[in-house]
Every structure is written in structure tokens, then in C-alpha cells.
Amino acid sequence: MQNKKFYVTTPIYYVNAAPHIGHAYTTILADVLARYHRLRGVPTFFLTGTDEHGQKVQRAAEKGAMTPQQQADQTVGRFQALWKKLDITHDDFIRTTETRHVRVVQQILQTLFDHGEIYRAEYDGGYCVPCERFYTGRELEAGTCRECGRALEPIRESNYFFRMSAYQAWLIDYIHEHPKFIQPDFRRNETLGFLQQPLNDLCISRPKSRLSWGIELPFDHDFVTYVWFDALVNYISAIGYLADDQRFQRWWPASYHLIGKDILTTHTVYWPTMLKAMNLPMPETIFAHGWWLVGDSKMSKSAGNVVNPIELADRYGVDAFRYFLMSEMTLGQDCNFSEEAFIRRYNADLANDLGNLLSRVMKLVTSHCGGKIPAATAEIVGADEQQLRQAVLNAATRMEECLDQMRLDLGLTAVASAVREANRYLEKRQPWTLAKQAEHGALNTVLYHAVETLRIVSGLLYPVMPTKMRELRQVLGLSATEPSLDQLKIWGKTVPGTPVGAMVSLFPRIQAGAPTQATTATGQPAALPQATPPTGVTLVEYADFAKISLRTATVLAAEKIEGTDKLLRLQVQCGEEKRQIVAGIALYYKPEELVDKTVVVVANLKPAKIRGVESQGMLLAASAENQLRLITVDGVLPSGAVVK
Ligand code: MSP
């Protein structure tokens, strides 16, 4: 790993919809890498932001009856609030609608146009609207979009093109000569495979008659810039390209562009050729991670299976959420998200292993060592102690190697196994028995080794769980300053005699069938009474219940469905989304009684057709005998609020 500086970026996120777990994942990964580098003492710059132009955003704005700028302003706040909640320590947040960015994009376009790198031509081909991609030649023959599989729309118009094809041979050579440029290796092969076909020039404009929401071409006011040609430039406009040369030279080239696998071509073909045309050095590594899936399929709004990171962080805690995402996904591969897997990992690694180690050590130090960390007795340090030291120091080395190889998941596995080793060590050395037998020398040695393990482990986990590890270190009386990674590779830095703090329960176990909120005032899991189900009702696990997303929604309109007695067609607003729901409530409610009511809907029910009418969700209602009443909200809440 180069030590001079570390510049890491996330993709900039479209502001057409709310953030989901995929966005949270990349941003947390970038945050963890940035934090590790800062702890290593490497000057670090971490950039994230939002991609605010283009058709997707314009369409979302039209749907929500807003201007694209209003749409962007509204959604950017949701991203910024999420990053704050998730403890993200970005150094800058760039919005592509900011003047500092627009100015740079226009200057680049003008220079490339002046140098003949951009030219005007007639375009005749196919177009994928959601992906904003043009297709010609062999790619067009398929009739569907390479990225999303949707049918292509025929299109014929005059546009501006970037001479991307001129760089094809250079790019292929560059990728071969720089094996770290595209990672993981199989993604590099994917790009090389793509480059086996002739590379077309890139259409970089959109006529304003079709799309007005974009950066105007400086040399033709009838066109705006293609959103990708605008968005990719964020990586250099944010750090002062064409504005502050010193700053730009300090950070460019990026150490890592972190991206999802779906935006590989734009980052490993468009971006390098753009940079080459600008005469700029290439980023060191473009790293494409896999996707978070739900039940083995892609998350999508229409399937209603989009995982909301705010809900998870609220339910289980920000740090546990960060830990789960970082340890569960093998970097580069797809990973299935499930709440069961979350609870399993949390209970195993955090509640049982780490939490247990801390509470055992704290109890003994408090009751047998006067609340001060004891010193190890040199002559008692034997094979068991050596084995533990080795396991812990190995974890520190392994974490460093894994970071350099972008295998954070494996680094965390090494740390988890060092913690397990420490618990095994305690079971073998039985400090509670040593305490009873007043074997002070042995007891002190064992406790010192356990505390020293916790010092190193908490430092290694600090970038992933900053709040919880800060608390853990305070409990152990360790310095309030952030740990330095170098100190984690050296055994024996804990100072004997340091007073420990008051015990806290860092990771209360999640009871099967109970949410984590079921804790007492002291943070301990509450003893939940064993519920007796009403006759005929099957008990379900909490994790099963948690799969159902219940939301508030406001009824915008309601009407009877022709030819039926019982069915009403409702249009409801649920957060930012409008939905149509068919409800069998016509015998109990007149359509006009429903308008403006705040109701509760099952928001992740698979859409279904009822009497030929699509229903995207279900209303909750209580019924008894011949009555039925809708479930509503006590008081005023915005639509889209989570019901739990
Ligand atoms: N605006 C472009 C990026 C421009 S970067 C110069 C964009 N935005 S996005 O909001 O649609 O997606 C941002 C990132 O989220 C992409 O890296 C994409 O791969 C990632 N993900 C979207 N869904 C995902 C999952 N289900 N899982 C993991 N990441 C996913 O593309």
C-alpha cells in the first residue's frame, strides 16, 4: 500500500429515489477504508455525492409534480441524513448541480471539442431510456439493453460524439499492463471481453427537445451533456481540477473508485478514455463489488423488497449494521440479505464472543483487582499465553494484508477468530477458579492477556464500529484518542494499574423472536414472558414478522370498481411513491369517506391483479362479525412512515 495519500470515492447516487442498502454498503465500505487509512496516519480524502442530472431524475420529478431541482434538493437531504446517521466521515459531498462541477464539465467539453475529440454526427440506432444508453451495430441487433434487458426504443437524431473508439487499443494495453487497475480479476476479464468488440464513439449529448435537465454544451445551446459524461467528472471536479491545481495534484489519481458491478463499463471504459483524452493519469484501482440480493433476486421497488438501511440501523444499531454489511459480503461477490443472517452473525460474533469476553474480563477486574488492570507475572507466561498472543497479533497482520487486497470480510474473520481464541483461553485457564483459590499471580496474568486482546481487537474493529469500540475502550480505561494501527501490532501496550470504567452492555443478545428494542433501562435484554398464542394461531419468529413492511399512506382518491359490489380502487401516497390498491371494503366505506385518511398498508406485498385491476399492496383493517374498520394512525404522521 502506498503511504503518500489515500483518495477513495463512492459512485455518486441518483436522486430519483430514496437510498437503499446497496448505497449504504458502498458508502460504509469507503468510510471503513478511509478510517483505516487515517488510523495508519495516511493523509486521506473521501468523496461521495449525488448525480442529479439526466432522464431518471427528470422523470421522477415529473411523476412527483416537481421541478428536477426540487426533486434533487429533496432527495439529496435523504442521502445526507443517512450518511450522518451511519457515521460516515466523508471529506466532501459533491452535487453535480453545483457551479463548481458544472463549470469544470463545460471547460472539459470545450477543450475536447476544440481539439477535435468531440464531433457532431447523425445518430440512428436504439436507445434504452432507463439506462440512457445508445446502441448501434451488433449490440442493436439483440433488440434489448445489455445492462437491464429492456426493449430498445428506435431513435434517430443529430448528436455530439466523443472519439472513444480511438483509445480502444491503448485501453486494452493499459489494462493488461496494470493488473490492479480493474479489480477483482474477473471484472478485469469482463471489461477485456467487452473490448473484444469494436468500440463505438460515445454519444455525449442529448437534444434539449428530448431532455432539458442537464449541463448545457458550451458550444451548442440546443443540447445538454449526457449524464455519464457529466457524472464521472465529479471525481476530479471535487478535488479542484481546473480550479485549484495544487489541491488537484495532491489527491489525483484516486486510489480507489468503489463501484457496483452494474456500472463497470462506464467506469472502466468511458472514464479511462475520457481521462486519456484529457491527458490525465488513470485512477489506481476501480473496484467493483457485487450486489445485495433479497431471496436471491434483485431488489426493486416494484417487487417491494427494497431493504431500507435506516430501519435496520434503527432496529439493531448503526455499528452492528456496519459490521454485518462488512463481514457478510465477500468483496466482489453478490450476497443475499436476510434478517435471519443478520441476527445470526450479530449474536455469534458480537453478543456471544466479543460481548462475553468483555463482560467476563470486567467482572473479574472489578471484583478481584480493585478495578485496575493488573500486571502479568513474567514467570507465569506460558504456552497458552503465547498461543493467544500469536492469534491476536496474527489478526492484526492479517487485517492489514486483507485491507490491501480488498478482502475486509476476511480481515474481520481473522479478528473474530482471535476473540474466540481469547474465550477459549479463559475457559482453559479458568480465572474465576484462580480468583477463588487466591492464585493472584496467575489470575493477573490471565486478565492482562484478555485485556490486551481487547485493546488490539477494539482497535482493529474501530473503523467498522467506531461508536461501540470507543465505548469498549473507555470501559477498559484505554486512552480516549483513536488507536493507531501501528500500536496494534505490538503486544503489551496496555498500562497495568489503569483504572477501568463502568461496565456497559455493548451488544445485548437478540432473543429469537424478540426485537432488540426489548431491552431494559440498563441495556440488558428484557426477560420476555412466554406468550401463549390465541387458539388456532401459529407463533412466528420475529424475523418472519420483520419481513413485512407496514407503512402509513394517505388516500388520494377512491372509486368503485365497475361490476363488483365489494371492491374499491384506491390511489394512495406512500412516502414518495403513489400506489394503486384494490380493497374489498366497499360494503363498509363510501369512496368519498376515504379521501385524505391516513391508513396502514402492507408495502412489500407482491403486486397482484384483482378482477383484472393491479393492486400494489394491501390495507390493514380490523373486522368482527359484520363490521370492518380501517386501521388508521392516532395523530398526524407523514405518509410512508414505518409501522412497527
Ligand atoms: N449515478 C450513477 C453512478 C455515477 S458514478 C459517477 C448510479 N447511481 S445509482 O444510484 O443508480 O447507483 C449507485 C450505486 O449503487 C451503483 O454502484 C450500484 O451498483 C449500487 N447498487 C444499486 N443497487 C445495489 C444493490 N442491490 N447492491 C449493491 N449495490 C447496488 O449508478
Image: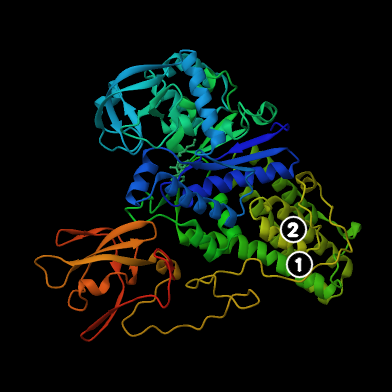
Secondary structure of residue under mark 1: helix
User: Residue at coordinates 44% horizontally, 21% vertically from top-left?
Assistant: 219
CA separation in Å, label 2 and label 1: 9 Å
Pick the residue in front: 289 or 129. 129
Relative to 530, residue 242 above or below? above
| Residue 325 visible to the viewer | yes
Q: Is residue 143 visible?
A: no
Side of 503 where 409 appears, left or right: left
Residue 538 point in image, percent of width and height? 35, 77
Image quadrant of residue 370? Answer: bottom right
Q: Amino acid at mark 1?
A: Val
Q: Is residue 577 left or right of residue 19?
A: left
| Label whose residue precedes the other's in the sequence (2 or 1) | 1
Quarter where residue 1 is shown: top right
Seen from the viewer's position, the closer of residues 74 and 272 is 74
Task: Please tell me whether mark 2 sits on a helix, a strand or a loop.
Answer: helix
Relative to residue 596, is residue 614 drawn left or right?
A: left
Q: Are marks 2 and 1 in contact (CB under 8 Å)?
A: yes
User: Residue 316, how many percent across, how many down?
Assistant: 55, 64
**Residue at the spot of label 2:** 454
- How far from the left and from the top, in percent, is residue 276? 53, 19
Within 10 Å of disc 2 (Cα), the crowding (few <14, some 14-19, many 20+) is many
- Quarter of the figure with the C terminus: bottom left
Q: Does mark 1 have its CB less than 8 Å from ligand 1?
A: no
Q: Amino acid at mark 2?
A: Leu
> Residue 561 has which mark?
none
**Residue drawn at (76%, 69%), measured in percent from left and top?**
362
Q: Which mark is residue 361?
A: 1
Q: Give percent across and percent down for residue 319.
A: 61, 58
Q: Is residue 395 left or right of residue 603?
A: right
